[in-house]
Amino acid sequence: MPRFINNNNLFSSHYYYFALFTLERLAVSYSRTSLGRKHRVIRIIALLILEGIVTQTNFLNLKNNCWPFVMWFFPLSFFALQFILRLWPGLMMQEIMSQFSIDAASFGLLAAFYYYGYAGMQIPMAILLEKFGAQKVVFTFTLLCGLGALLFASTNNFYLALFSRFLIGASSAAGFLGVSKVISEWFSSNQYSQMVGFSFSVGLLGAVYGGKPVSQLIATYGGQHVGQVLALCSISIGLLAYLVLRTPKNIKTTKSNEINLSYLSVLFTSRILWTLALANLLMVGALEGFADVWGVSYLTTAYGFTKSDAAFLVSFIFVGMLFGGPLLAFLSKKLGNYKVIGFCGIGLALAFLVLLSDRVSNWWILSILFFVIGLMCCYQVIVFAAGSTLVSSKHLGITIAFLNCINMFGGSFFHTLIGKIMDYYWEGSFTANGLRQYSIQSYHHALVVIPLGALLGTALVYLIHKNAKNQVRLASVEQTTAS
């Protein structure tokens, strides 16, 4: 297991990090909307959380040494930039669909390819950072990311666009993992949690302030020129990282034989772990499928909301997630991990069936519904906790990376599936720009996969829970017989 994945830090601040992850989602949602009165609420929440992070970090009291922060700056800059690159296609969705003459299924596939690359590189990137160090890895993948952005900005070939988005996603995995690696080397162990949290707050500026300004730049200068600038920024960060970024002298270079790849056998041979990961993937549609991509367009089509009001409504899912982590953690101690995950799966299915019925048109009721959905979306943090009980402590880091990897694949799965179903039920109408226009029936048929996935995931969790109870009974019987 890579040494910069610290087991104690991972779970001592587990729910703290999940709140920061939720703030990332808030930032993405906020960046897609105009700054009306309602959206200032989201900004206030974000700023309060950031202020708390800065306070906990004791930024000015870290040994009065600037070198750790200089080293930290380069992967952190790339971490912030990759948020902008992730949002980039969403800021010019209509232009991309028109440029490549594609439908909803193809655009969903294009969005999914970023996540294929990002998810697939989680474990390999951790191993590469441990073997070659942050300097070489950050340099290499920032250059690859820049080349991918240049390709995406300049190509008119859809297949090259798919490849470029995959390359950008795979390279972006070096962002946060690179930050974690540098922090583990240049800061003391008791500063690790605070610095990781502060890194999230700084990195999120790329999502919070990168959406609207980049959208305005695209409107003024065109997507191609903006893409070229983003690519040059990535390449510049890589070159500077290669020139400046170093490993502390007291850190010994890790030998390749110290990277125990046999740990992967634990993942490949554990049917329970794979079942838990699959359940996590099936239940993630509410967040990855609806909140991230399709929620705003559904609300504007089904309920007639403006784009900004629809985006604000969807953001209540992320607000709910801020409170869901501690709440579900408390419930899991009382009821057990698997029961809480199962209740969340059933709750998500029921909530989406109500939403898709189109019978709830009141803005405030919808906001409460989305808030509750956000609470239940925090089941993911309980999945990580449940996974930690299935392996030994030495396998913990790679197990969490594996579960997170499959979780990210869930976004690709739902983006692709929803887009394909929408095209299948397309009724043949076009917009004034010649793009396909999708009816409310198309959305209903496509989005029903979210509650169905939640129910299937719940069924798998029930099987895991039943199997775990049987193993406990068997162990108890064997112990009684032996005595």
Image (cartoon, rainbow, N blue to C red):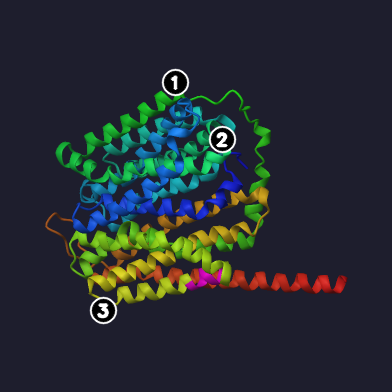
Q: Residue 407, position in %: x, y?
A: 48, 56
Q: Is residue 60 magenta?
A: no
Q: Mark 2 — residue? A: 188
Cα gap from disc 3 to disc 2, whole angstroms:
55 Å
Find the residue positioned furthest to the top: 243
**Could you tell me if residue 414 is visible in this image?**
no
Magenta extent: 338-343
| Residue appearing at x 45%, y 30% in the figure | 69
Q: Residue 131, position in %: x, y?
A: 59, 32
Q: Is residue 342 magenta?
A: yes
**Residue 338 is drawn in which quadrant?**
bottom right
| Residue appearing at x 30%, y 64% in the figure | 422
**Residue 252 is drawn in which quadrant?**
top right
Say which of 435 and 47 sits in front: 47
Say which of 262 and 466 sits in front: 466
Q: Main secondary structure of the magenta part?
A: helix
Q: Mark 3 — residue? A: 359
| Residue appearing at x 88%, y 71% in the figure | 483
Q: Earlier in the sequence, mark 3 or mark 2?
A: 2
Say which of 367 and 231 sits in front: 367
